[in-house]
Image (cartoon, rainbow, N blue to C red):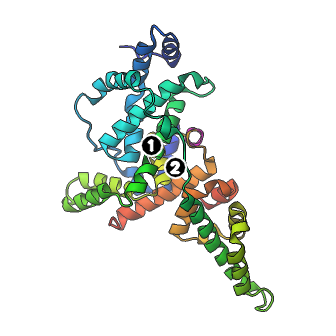
Amino acid sequence: MKNEDIKEELLRLSKPLADLPKVEKQGVPADYFNNLPSLTWNKITTDTSSTTHAERRIVPIWGKLAGVAASFALLFSMFQQLSLDQPQDDLPLDAVVEYFIDNVDELDEEFLFEIHVQSLDLAELGDDALDYILEEDLEMIDDQILEALY
Amino acid sequence: MKVPEDDEILELIADPSDQERGFKLMMVKYQKPLYWHIRRMVKEHEDANDVLQNTFIKVYKNIERFESKSKLYTWLYKIATNESITFLNKKKRIKTESLETAELVKESRAVDSQDGDLIIKKLNSAIDKLPEKQRMVFSMRYFDEMTYNQISEMLGTSVGGLKASYHHAVKKIETLILEGKLN
């Protein structure tokens, strides 16, 4: 049943892909799976501290900066759109951009992203921007928007 | 040989005198699906082997924290997924471009189109070109045939977000395969 649902979904999305045979062509050394449980058990009993350092997850600073930069770029495009609907002297785009550049450290990344997402048509986004959203900031986007998109 | 139920395995693991047997039974039962899940993400066998062993070590260290609210299988997948992501993040810092992908693409071009393997290679190359999270979601749905709810539980991503990722991935793979944009 579950399997059928997945097949039907794929058929709806892409018939060529649904028609492809699902074959994994990667090789595994002979007897790998026969030996793995004993090898792993030996490792467990001899090595008790090898992975403790890996449990900590570090968020690199550049990731945050990239998020802010992307949000800013998206925000910029939002203001470009807004500026088409408003008189030029009402809210000069340069002044808005300058304000955000000067105060970007004080602005909340999620807030920037949210106001952008709420005001943009995601279907208009290019593949790169959509990839960025789907990879990095998915949780900030309302489920209904995503459902509507796909 | 009869495949033991998860409850039986967990009971054995909880008993110090049977712990080794119980843990080995668990590995035998789940090593293949976990291995392929990891291998699709990290690509190389050596890397998949390391990640899988680390996964089992982590499972061993945390088995007491496992609560039967979720299935053992789901919990194991979740740990394997996290270990794979940790591995990929470490690797990303060292290597920005995947040489394996480049090799695969080169290889797929070299094979004559009359070979049925070509389309499989193209599919693999297209999957390799997906961003990390889309690749993971695509593999879990397409190869492992998981429901969105199962994937959501493992990745901590909303079902709507997963659908978006999967649908976007499918469209991208289709475009890459049909329009020959695999370079």
- How many neighbours does mark 1 have within 10 angstroms: few (below 14), some (14-19), or many (20 or more)? many
Q: Secondary structure at mark 2?
A: helix
Name the chief secondary structure element in magenta.
helix
**Percent position (x, y) of residue B144?**
44, 39
Quadrant that contains the C terminus of chain B? bottom left
Looking at the rendering, which quadrant does residue B115 occupy? bottom left
The residue at the far top in this view is B17
Against A62, residue B15 (above or below) is: above
Give the residue at mark 1: B84
- How many neighbours does mark 2 have within 10 angstroms: few (below 14), some (14-19), or many (20 or more)? some
Against A42, residue A82 (above or below) is: below
Q: Chain of mark 2?
A: A
Amino acid at pointer 2: Glu
Residue visible at 22% across and 31% down?
A30
Q: Is residue B99 something that shows in the picture?
A: yes
Q: Chain of mark 1?
A: B
Give the residue at mark 2: A9
**Percent position (x, y) of residue B46?**
30, 41
Depth check, front residue: B78 or B140: B78
Q: Which residues are magenta?
A: B148-153
**Percent position (x, y) of residue B143?**
42, 42
The residue at the far right in this view is A90
